[in-house]
Image (cartoon, rainbow, N blue to C red):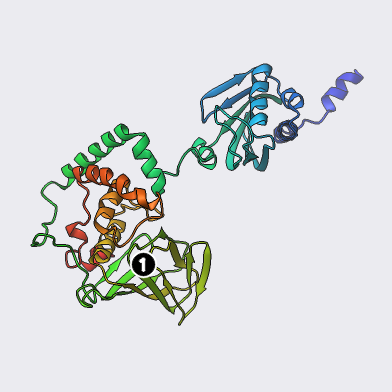
Amino acid sequence: MTAFWTAVAEPKVPDSSIHANMHNRRRAVVGEHVAAENAHDFERCIGAFGHPRYEVMATGEVYDGAKRVEVLLLENKRAFPDFHFDVRRMRDADDAIVVEGDFRGTHLGTWRGLPATGRAIDFPLIIVFEFEADRLICERTYFDLGTALRQLGVARDPNSRSGQIAMVLNHPLTLARALVDQARARRDAAAGAAPALPSTGAGWRPEGVVGAEIFNAMSGERLVFLQTHRSSSGALFQARITMPAGHYVIESHFHPYQEERFEVESGQLAVRVGNALRYLDKGEDITIPVRTVHSYWNAGSEPLQVLYEHRPALVSAEVFFQTYFGLSRDGKLSPAGVMNTLQAAVLIQEVGDFIRPPKPYPPLQDALFKPLAELGRALGYRPWYPQYLIGNSSAAEAE
């Protein structure tokens, strides 16, 4: 009878408390497991599982059972002897703990056939620790394999110039098929709607017009032509450029035959010349020698306005700005301002005396760009387009 009354009188534990206790036990298991793996104590790490199992979603690999999991962990240690997973936050799910963090290490041993590069890796990783009650049964990892490979130096950022060239060289058939399909779709969509070219003669190139303004939708730059090749008899290209505050950087480039000058009229300009960084305030100026790699950006919190000059003046500069700014308004540049590889090759063939990227190695550029430009032209890419030329696009379109 006493036992009966004791059982009846025992207070009922709320479901919320039961769930909280379960989550706490699971978090403790995960914490123990991560701590053991970071200490490279793999026996303790594997012992945290009710049933050891790793699923690597980036590669589709499954390591099931203690021996297979140990193989994976030992391979990771040989490749990255100092590897470490730093937890940023945990989330509770019905049957899992979700952990966000960063995987860090130094590549000092062979990994998946790749000899040690000595490079550091540091990339975000999400791990889903799956449970049955408070029994850990699976660790499922999600990460971007491309990021890891780029950090190891065996892959390229597809938004970079070198990455786009590597893509063309490594996967020519795949890229060619995709570009042909894209060109066909573009032609079908624009059939009969393309504006006509202005009346031109042999060797005609689209020039700038003194007083005309063009707009770059990616950087927010506005460029007003003040002196052109025609107005200065080839002596001076001059423009006024305004750029809003922000984090946009004009990517590294050089000018093969011209010196370049910036004079700050308002705001603050940052210019990187080689490895040297200089900040310029109102009234200050800088001249960049011929063939010197540089980049620049608005370093202040207010709009930047600069007087921008090249000596001598080249028509190719006027071609470049009209086309490049036009592509930006049509959404045909990456967020960093990078063109499609074939479009870039076609444009550089036309304006290479004005501007060049620093990579690939300059003496190799013509050899690499020429076949790419031929392919680009065959697919419909051009160094300029009627709709981008001054006088052919309205102010509304420019905005």
Foreground residue among 316 and 242: 316
168 is higher (above) or lower (below) than 285? above
Extreme residue in the front direction: 363
Residue 328, how many percent across, how many down?
A: 31, 57
Q: Is residue 267 above or below residue 183?
A: below
Which residue is located at x 89 percent, y 19 percent?
Answer: 3
Q: Residues within 10 Å of mark 1 (few under 14, many from 20)?
A: some
> Residue 265, percent across and down?
41, 80
* Residue in the foreground of this view, choosing between 13 and 342: 342
Name the residue type under label 1: Glu
Classify residue 374 by image quadrant. top left
Q: Given the current orientation, which residue lies at the most extreme right position?
A: 2
Residue 107 sits above or below residue 394 on the image:
above
- Which residue is at 22% across, 60% downward? 388
Is 318 rendered above or below residue 17?
Answer: below
SS under mark 1: loop
In the image, residue 259 lies at what x, y percent?
A: 36, 70
Q: Is 182 on the left or on the right of 121, as rendered?
A: left
Quadrant location, the C terminus: bottom left
Tell me the residue at 26%/43% (across/down). Answer: 371
Which residue has dot 1 on it? 221
Q: Is residue 75 left or right of residue 157?
A: right
